[in-house]
Amino acid sequence: MIYFIYNLSMNYPLNEKVTYIIKTLNNHGFEANIVGGCVRDILLSREPSDYDINTNATPEQVLEVFKDHKTFKTGLKHGTVFLVLDNESFEITTYRIDGNYIDYRRPETVKFSLNLKDDLNRRDFTINALAYNNKDGLLDFNNGQEDLKNQLIRCIGNPYNRFEEDALRILRAIRFASALGFEIEKETQKAIFSKKHLLSNISIERIYIELLKTLMGEYVSNVLPLYKEILEIFIPEFKYVAKYKFIENLNYLSKEKKDTSIILAIFLQPVEEHTDVLKRLKVDNRTYREVSFLIEHYYYLIEANNVDMRFSLNKMGKEMFIKLLKLQFYNEHIDQSYYKLCLSTLDYIKENKLPYRLKDLAINGNDIKNFGFKDQEISQQLNKVLSLVIKNKIINTKKEIYNYLTKIILKSN
Ligand code: ATP
Ligand code: MG
């Protein structure tokens, strides 16, 4: 990937709200910058996912400066104030030095600092330790710009120490490699392998967030095969997955960027005990159900004719059916022309309002009841009627369905 590196001069047009936040803090005598991921992304001409701001104002001072705005104090002990402007939320964080780390995962204490340099030095990678404001321009004390140009992910300081402080950084390095297509610098890479065991100290919630972002990265299929053994620290089941199969599925995975269930299904399909892994990752119930379903139906035969498709739609629900269809296109179980054919059948069903659910029928349970059916017979008959309607054996009008019901009543007497 060739990135055009933006030359971040002092006149870079920051968006209105960010400019407002920085100006307001400046007007009260404080320093303020955009910092971290957003600066990195601007330099790479990528759209920042959000703008983080750092300042030498203490959290109390930030709250005071923005007292006429909506703020949240949930991150206050880490020095972060959440400021809301027109439904958009901004993190404003006081310059910080992290104290001694305990348990390889969190600083024992958080100390505020008046010095931007302290705040940048505590950050994980050189490319994430850039700050910018319109007066001073780009602020880079760790050669971050150089590493951006050379497309390198490099820890700030000694990588072995930095991973001991917080082992999640091991996964973050891999995540940024996957998202940006950068290489991990040699020493940082060595430290990743030598400190990988420390990942067992990290909470699964933090790991899961980084894992998902890694799987959504554009370069996941190039990067993750190099780090399979890191993955095996928290998903040891991957030890029993052959490398070629692992890579094959990562290639399929590159085709989906958003849908968590599809992504996890493709990723975990080669793992026999995938439901154990899902539980360990503490995915929510819906994701658990969807991923299990998708893996179970990985090679399910999807018919392209509208009758069979309506039976599938009835069984799976439309949303899951579409997910499965996409999944089978990604995993090359169906080819592009078949995929398109299925989509056009789906459109045809929609446009012609062809019934496939009980609620699409011209009658309901009460009508069936009036014919003298009781209890579970009611739903049995409803489903029977639906099945005949889908097969075009009866037309979906009250009259035709009543005719049919009358006939079976007469027959049974
Ligand atoms: P994204 O665009 O995906 O949000 P990001 O760089 O903003 O990427 P975040 O996880 O949002 O990543 O973190 C924001 C910034 O905080 C990082 O750029 C980095 O400077 C710093 N940071 C985050 N996590 C750590 C960590 N574990 N150790 C050190 N610094 C960190
Ligand atoms: Mg961010």
Image (cartoon, grey):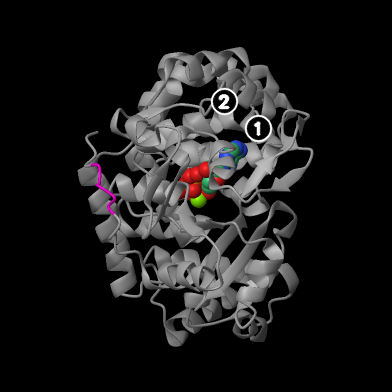
Q: Is residue 24 left or right of residue 42?
A: right
Does label 1 or label 2 sit earlier along the sequence? 2
Percent position (x, y) of residue 366? Answer: 64, 84
Percent position (x, y) of residue 115? Answer: 58, 47
Residue kind at label 1, given as amino acid type: Val
Residue 6 falls inside the magenta stretch? yes
Q: Is residue 16 above or below residue 264?
A: below
Residue 260 visible from this viewpoint: no
Circles 1 and 2 in contact, beta carbons < 8 Å: yes
Q: Is residue 100 left or right of residue 226?
A: right
Say which residue appears at 67% left-offset and 71% top-offset.
63
Q: Nearer the viewer, residue 49 or 391?
A: 49
Say which residue appears at 23% left-offset and 43% top-offset.
336
Q: Is residue 146 above or below residue 78?
A: above
Q: Which residue is mark 1?
A: 277
Q: Is residue 288 left or right of residue 396?
A: right
Q: Which residue is mark 2?
A: 271
Front disc: 1 or 2: 1
Q: Mark 1: which secondary structure?
A: helix
Residue kind at label 2, given as amino acid type: Val
Q: Mark 2: which secondary structure?
A: loop
Say which residue appears at 61% left-offset and 65% top-offset.
82
C-alpha gap between disc 1 and disc 2: 9 Å
Quarter of the picture containing the N terminus is top left
Task: Residue lying at the far front in this picture: please name it.
Answer: 29
Q: Which residues are magenta?
A: 5-9
Quarter of the picture containing the C terminus is bottom right
